Amino acid sequence: MGIHVLIRSNPPCGYCTKTKALLDMKGLAYTTEDHETPEKVEAFKNAGHRSFPRVFIDGELIGGFDELQKHLQEKSSEDDDF
């Protein structure tokens, strides 16, 4: 069974680029929502997020790059989807 990964990102964000590269390396497909206009960034902040990227797996907020990396390491030992 596959997973759905959503990345809320801001194109100039270095950690957003690293997040996408990590998922590519793991062979995991993802969808990206770019927040590139001031209005989208403001809506992102109003939703309670403070930094980019925000990674969601199957609708659950995982966090940013560091949290995703930790999550993938933990899941790789217990689940074949990772």
Image (tube, helix red, strand yellow):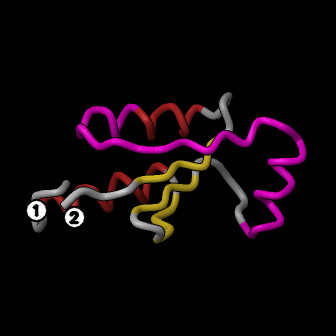
Crowdedness near tag 2: few (<14), some (14–19) or many (≥20) residues, C-alpha within 10 Å: few
Residue 78 in the figure: left or right of residue 63: left
Residue identifier under label 1: 77
Q: Residue at x 77, y 36 (%)?
A: 36
Mark 2 vs mark 1, CA separation in Å: 6 Å
Crowdedness near tag 1: few (<14), some (14–19) or many (≥20) residues, C-alpha within 10 Å: few
Residue 31 in the figure: left or right of residue 43: left
Percent position (x, y) of residue 51?
Answer: 68, 53
Please tell me in which quadrant of the rendered image residue 81 appears. bottom left
Location of residue 23 with respect to 5 vertically, above or below:
above
Please tell me in which quadrant of the rendered image residue 10 appears. top right
The quadrant of the picture occupied by the C terminus is bottom left
Residue 17 in the figure: left or right of residue 49: left
Element class at badge 1: loop
**Residue 8 part of the magenta segment:** no
Numbered range of the magenta stretch: 21-48
The quadrant of the picture occupied by the N terminus is bottom left
Find the residue positioned furthest to the top. Answer: 12
Is label 2 in contact with label 1 (beta carbons under 8 Å)? yes
Q: Which mark is residue 56?
A: none
Location of residue 18 with respect to 8 vertically, above or below:
above
Residue identifier under label 2: 74
Q: Amino acid under label 2? A: Glu
Please tell me in which quadrant of the rendered image residue 74 appears. bottom left
Element class at badge 2: helix
Percent position (x, y) of residue 41?
Answer: 81, 48
